[in-house]
């Protein structure tokens, strides 16, 4: 339990607060020290923890793969190269399975999404108090280690995917074709407003579902970790109740963490697959 | 949990990572995988071809062996035939030679017999003459009756 948090509510709030950099109420720029301060910063603020962690994880992924790509040999692969080749073949085959058009960008995009999201989700498995404790001892008030529990990160990626969907829809079908797809089906040209409403919802639902699914899963998972961590925090002297709570925290967090290995991978895979499917739909001519 | 400029930063970061991956990570690894795939395929094709070649070579060697055996058999039988021919020829020649020798010997013997008979006849006539001379006495002149004697000799 963090030294600053005294009640369960404070503990939870502390763990769910991003380290936000923006304009403080007194007009100067700095890091918000409370949730209210962070809220007051408005749009032009930056969640430093999300930004730094996602940049770091993405950079590690890129460096590992780049170092393999630079020294790649066609002989017998070993170690890291073996892993990267396996990853690439896995991504390549699953992209081939769901993407029928020709586009040299989709497979690298899928690889990036999978490993970036996977590594961001994986931070969930770090013991939840270690990093915030370390950071608060360094004088940093908050540090949320899992970037994918920040909707900014998931929506940021979803918006990127959405822009690609729009770009390829217009590139493949032409502006007229794309607008036609949005307005001329399913009810023909006399049902244009209804069509636009239905297809518009359909279109907007893509990035929102992408972002919210990942965010919701990781946020809920993180929340369960926090609640499990509270059990041991309820230690109140050497009584049977305290010992039971403490023991169940260990068992439950172990169980939840093992379950989370599945969730982490699955969510990364789902994000990747849905992106590929959405792009495939953007490439397809319907009529 | 506020939506703020992190959104933009994440989008830009995402775009940069995708660009980097597309530019510097994906192509070399995929190219290497393709190349290895090709190498393996080539290797397998080579192995297949080598196997085929081996099959051909063993078939060919068996054929050559068979031919060689056949030829050797031919040579042996030819040699045997020739040997028996030579033996036959030698036999014929020996027979001829023997016949010739026998004929020569016979002729010589005949000649000897003839000569002996001649000599005998001469001696007999001489003896007969001498006998007759002794019987007739000295009257008969050897010179005067030479013609008669010769005729007598020829008759004997």
Image (tube, coloured by chain):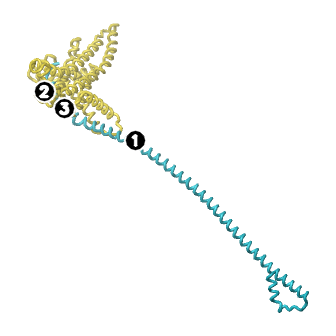
Chain colours: A yellow, B cyan
At horizontal 80% and vertical 85% (from top left) the residue drawn is B151
Residue A267's image quarter? top left
Residue at horizontal 21 percent and vertical 13 percent from the top: A10
Q: Chain of mark 3?
A: B
**Which element type, helix, strand or loop, lies under badge 2?**
helix
Q: Pointer 1: residues within 10 angstroms few (<14), some, or many (20+)?
A: few
Q: Nearer the viewer, mark 1 or mark 3?
A: 1
Q: Report the side of B114 relative to B132 (left or right).
A: left
Quarter-wise, where is residue A162 in the image?
Answer: top left
Label 1: element kind? helix
Check if mark 2's residue and mark 3's residue have beta carbons within 8 Å: no
Query: Residue B10's spot in the image, x, y percent?
Result: 17, 26
Q: Considering only vertical position in the picture, is B45 above or below A266?
A: below
Q: Nearer the viewer, mark 2 or mark 3?
A: 2
Q: Residue furthest top?
A: A240
Quadrant housing the C terminus of chain A: top left
Disc 3 target residue = B16
Q: What residue is drawn where x is 26% and y is 13%?
A: A227
Residues tagged 2 and 1 counted as in contact (Cβ below 8 A): no
Task: State how far apart marks 2 and 1 are (Cα).
Answer: 53 Å
Q: Examine the rendered structure and indicate whether residue A10 appears above or below residue B25.
A: above
Q: Return the x and y of residue B90 as percentages of the image width and height.
A: 65, 64
What chain is tagged by disc 2? A
**Alpha carbon distance from label 1 to label 3:** 47 Å
Residue for badge 2? A178
Labels 2 and 1 in the same subunit: no
The residue under label 1 is B48
Chain-order first, disc 1 or disc 3: 3
Tell me if residue B83 comes above or below residue A91 in the rendering: below
Chain to which mark 1 belongs: B
Q: Where residue B34 sits in the image (x, y, percent)?
A: 30, 38
Q: Residues within 10 Å of mark 2 (few under 14, many from 20)?
A: some
């Amino acid at each position: 339990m963090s030294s600053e948090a005294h009640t369960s509510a404070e503990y939870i709030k502390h763990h769910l607060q991003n380290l936000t950099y923006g304009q403080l109420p007194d007009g100067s720029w700095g890091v918000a020290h409370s949730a209210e301060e962070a809220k007051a910063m408005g749009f032009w603020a930056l969640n430093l923890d999300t930004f730094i962690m996602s940049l770091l994880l993405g950079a590690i992924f890129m460096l590992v793969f780049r170092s393999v790509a630079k020294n790649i040999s066609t002989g017998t692969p070993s170690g890291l190269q073996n892993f990267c080749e396996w990853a690439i073949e896995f991504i390549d085959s699953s992209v081939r399975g769901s993407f029928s058009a020709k586009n040299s960008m989709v497979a690298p995009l899928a690889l990036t999404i999978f490993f970036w999201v996977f590594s961001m989700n994986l931070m969930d498995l770090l013991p939840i108090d270690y990093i915030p404790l370390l950071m608060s001892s360094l004088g940093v008030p908050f540090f949320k280690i899992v970037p994918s529990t920040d909707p900014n990160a998931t929506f940021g990626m979803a918006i990127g995917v959405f822009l690609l969907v729009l770009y390829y829809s217009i590139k493949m079908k032409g502006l007229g074709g794309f607008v036609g797809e949005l307005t001329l089906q399913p009810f023909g040209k006399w049902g244009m407003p209804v069509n636009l409403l239905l297809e518009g919802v359909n279109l907007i639902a893509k990035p929102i579902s992408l972002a919210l699914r990942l965010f919701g899963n990781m946020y809920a998972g993180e929340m369960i970790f926090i609640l499990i961590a509270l059990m041991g925090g309820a230690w109140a002297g050497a009584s049977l109740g305290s010992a039971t709570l403490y023991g169940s925290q260990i068992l439950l967090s172990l169980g939840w963490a093992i379950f989370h290995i599945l969730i982490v991978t699955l969510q990364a895979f789902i994000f990747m697959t849905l992106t590929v499917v959405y792009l495939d739909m953007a490439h397809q001519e319907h009529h | 949990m506020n939506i703020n400029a992190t959104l933009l930063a994440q989008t830009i970061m995402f775009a940069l990572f995708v660009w980097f991956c597309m530019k510097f990570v994906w192509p070399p690894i995929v190219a290497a995988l393709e190349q290895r795939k090709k190498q393996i395929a080539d290797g397998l094709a080579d192995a297949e071809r080598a196997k085929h070649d081996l099959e051909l070579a063993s078939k060919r060697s068996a054929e050559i062996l068979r031919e060689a055996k056949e030829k050797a058999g031919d040579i042996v039988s030819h040699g045997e035939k020739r040997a028996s021919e030579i033996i036959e020829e030698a036999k014929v020649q020996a027979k001829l030679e023997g016949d010739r020798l026998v004929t020569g010997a016979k002729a010589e013997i005949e000649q000897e017999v003839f000569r002996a008979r001649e000599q005998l006849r001469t001696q007999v006539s001489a003896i007969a003459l001498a006998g007759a001379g002794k019987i007739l006495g000295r009257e008969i002149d050897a010179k005067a009756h030479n013609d008669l004697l010769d005729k007598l000799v020829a008759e004997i």
